[in-house]
Structures are given as C-alpha cells and as structure tokens.
C-alpha cells in the first residue's frame, strides 16, 4: 500500500449531503455537485472535490449513513442555492493513499488502510473525517486519494 503523509490545510467547502446507503446515490450527488460547480465557474483542472463518509455502515443503519460531496470554494464565495450547504474541512496531519479511481480500489483501500497504519504506529484521529480527495488533474489520469486523519 502506497502511503504518503501530508499536512492538509483547512478548506471552506460547498457540499451536498446524501443520506442513505453508500453507493450509487453518492455518485449521483457527486454529479449534481459537479454540475452546480461548473455552472458557477467553480470547476476546472485545479478544483478539489472531496467525498466524506460520516458514518460506519457496520455500526450505522444503511438508511442513516451520511455522505457529503464537496467542492473547495474561496472564503469570499457566496452560495445562493437552497440545496447547497456550506462548511469547513479542518486541516491537519493525514496519511494519504493514492489509488486507482475505481469502486473496487476505493473499497479495498477502506478495508486495508487501518491495519496498515496501525502497523506503522499511526492512530486514527476520530475528531476529523476521512476524506476521499478527487483533484481533477489526478482523476483525469484515473487516480484519487483517501486521506486518513492521524496522530
């Protein structure tokens, strides 16, 4: 497993929350957000998109799982859409796993990352969410990243 470490900055985000089983509905929320971002000139080759799974499906009912699909916005940007929320991602130290941008690779990384990090002496910081990071340039080359907050 290819793990690097990064101090990720805090970001202001615009996001759509999807509540329900993780999977195809998350993809639909991602497309809706990207379409909104494109129509508001917030989507280009330098854009950063995040996916945030807030709940563990092993301990939360599938119908209650929350997934936010987010785009980084400037501090000055004013969101005027009712279905678009605003928030912040707290920065800090993260283990970053670069993986193929496929459902299978993402699923495998979610299973393998915690044992690998524990083996290396790192601990998961439960005060910050795990981030799926999609930098447009990277996605165009069929890669994405999972960023695990650590201490």
Image (tube, rainbow, N blue to C red):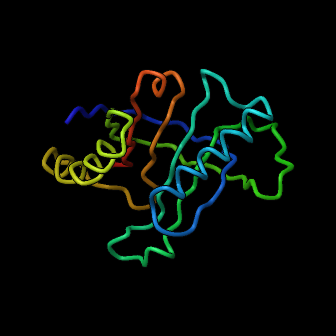
Q: Is residue 107 left or right of residue 75?
A: left
Q: Foreground: 23 or 5?
A: 23
Q: How many marks?
A: 0
| Residue located at (57% from left, 33% from top) | 48
Q: Tell me residue 133's x, y (percent).
A: 47, 39
Q: Tell me residue 82's x, y (percent).
A: 82, 58
Q: Foreground: 137 or 25?
A: 25
Q: Is residue 11 left or right of residue 21?
A: right
Give the residue furthest to the left: 119
Q: Tell me residue 7's x, y (percent).
A: 43, 35
Q: Foreground: 99 or 76?
A: 99
| Residue located at (30% from left, 52% from top) | 110
Q: Is residue 23 left or right of residue 66?
A: left
Residue 119 in the image: above or below residue 44? below
Residue 94 in the image: above or below residue 23? above
Where does the N terminus fall, quadrant-wise?
top left
| Residue located at (51% from left, 21% from top) | 137
| Residue located at (31% from left, 55% from top) | 124
* Image-quadrant location for residue 125: bottom left
Q: Tell me residue 16's x, y (percent).
A: 66, 55
Q: Is residue 39 left or right of residue 22?
A: right
């Amino acid at each position: 497993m290819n793990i690097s470490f990064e101090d990720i900055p805090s970001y202001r985000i615009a996001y759509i929350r999807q509540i329900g089983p993780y999977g195809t509905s998350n993809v639909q929320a991602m497309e809706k957000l990207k379409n909104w971002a494109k129509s508001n000139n917030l989507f280009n080759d330098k854009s950063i998109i995040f996916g945030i799974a807030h709940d563990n499906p092993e301990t939360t009912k599938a119908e209650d799982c929350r997934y936010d699909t987010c785009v980084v916005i400037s501090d000055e940007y004013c969101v005027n859409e009712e279905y678009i929320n605003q928030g912040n991602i707290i920065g800090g130290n993260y283990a970053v796993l670069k993986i193929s941008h496929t459902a299978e690779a993402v699923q495998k990384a979610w299973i393998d990352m915690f044992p690998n990090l524990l083996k290396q002496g790192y601990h998961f910081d439960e005060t910050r969410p795990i981030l799926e990071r999609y930098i447009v340039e990277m996605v165009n080359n069929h890669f994405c990243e999972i960023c695990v907050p650590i201490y």
